[in-house]
Amino acid sequence: MYKAALFDLDGVVFDTEPQYSVFWGQECRRYHPEQPGLEYRIKGQTLPKILNVCLALPVDEQQELIKRLDAFEAQMAYDYVPGFERYIATLREKNIKTAVVTSSNRAKMNSVYRQRSEFKTLFDAILTSEDFAESKPSPDCYLRAAKCFNAQPSECVVFEDSFNGLKAGRAAGMFVVGLSTTNTVEQITPLADIVIPDYTHLSLITRNS
């Protein structure tokens, strides 16, 4: 068995990516209409990197966008990806450590906790953007999560959906499960060890899978 299972949040735990694609599509077209599809390329990045690098917004514009984002996240639907609750319960029963490793910040997570009071009980650790120095596709976030459990990269399995997240898991030297909730199977297959649509039929993954 793997020692730890590390999960991205949006598109992996929650089926929220279609909602985010709408929000970020509007924002990207507002500021960079000359870059169609930018909302897909920024997935997996921390909010500061999106604001400062990807969108390159002045401070006053950043603050206005953050207000819109906070309001949007407060009313989002946080529905679990099919089969996730059963799968995470099975991992916990087998004493496999579990963590969320997300580029979302703590303010976003507070919106999650308000809607999903049970959320914290599902995981042994929750790492947000404030807990690591570099954004995905850097492996920093996953390596830090492994250290939480005194686990080697080879003892960890990563669940990801975005290109940046999949690359981060690969760069960390971990077994990577790609979820085709955001991108197509064909697009993410080169970046994942296995690809699944959801957790409905997923069995425990062993280190010789």
Image: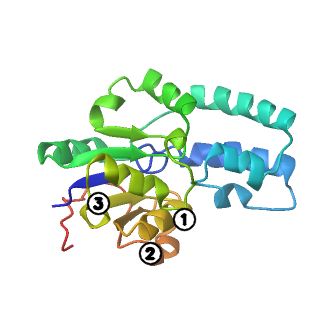
Question: Label 1 sits on what residue type?
Answer: Phe
Does residue 56 appear left or right of residue 125 in this picture? right
Mark 1 vs 3, N-terminal side: 3
Are circles 1 and 3 on residues that touch, CB within 8 Å? no
**For the point 43% across and 37% down, which residue is it?**
79
Mark 3 vs 2, N-terminal side: 3
Q: On residue 189, which mark appears?
A: 2
Q: Which is nearer the eye, 133 or 136?
A: 133
**Looking at the picture, how far across and down is residue 167, in whole percent?**
50, 67
| Residues at marks 1 and 2, CA–CA distance in whole angstroms | 10 Å
Question: Label 2 sits on what residue type?
Answer: Thr
Element carrying mark 3: strand
| Residue topped by disc 3 | 156
**For the point 43% across and 70% down, which residue is it?**
170
Does residue 27 appear left or right of residue 126 in this picture? right
**For the point 76% across and 35% down, which residue is it?**
65
Label 3 vs label 2, nearer the camera: 3
Q: Badge 2: few (under 14), some or many (20 or more) residues near its Cα, within 10 Å?
A: some
Label 1 vs label 3, nearer the camera: 3
Question: Label 3 sits on what residue type?
Answer: Cys
The quadrant of the picture occupied by the N terminus is bottom left
Using the rendered view, name the quadrant where residue 142 is placed.
bottom left
| Residues at marks 3 and 2, CA–CA distance in whole angstroms | 19 Å
The quadrant of the picture occupied by the C terminus is bottom left
Residue 76 visible in image: no
Does residue 124 appear left or right of residue 206 in this picture? right
| Residue topped by disc 1 | 163
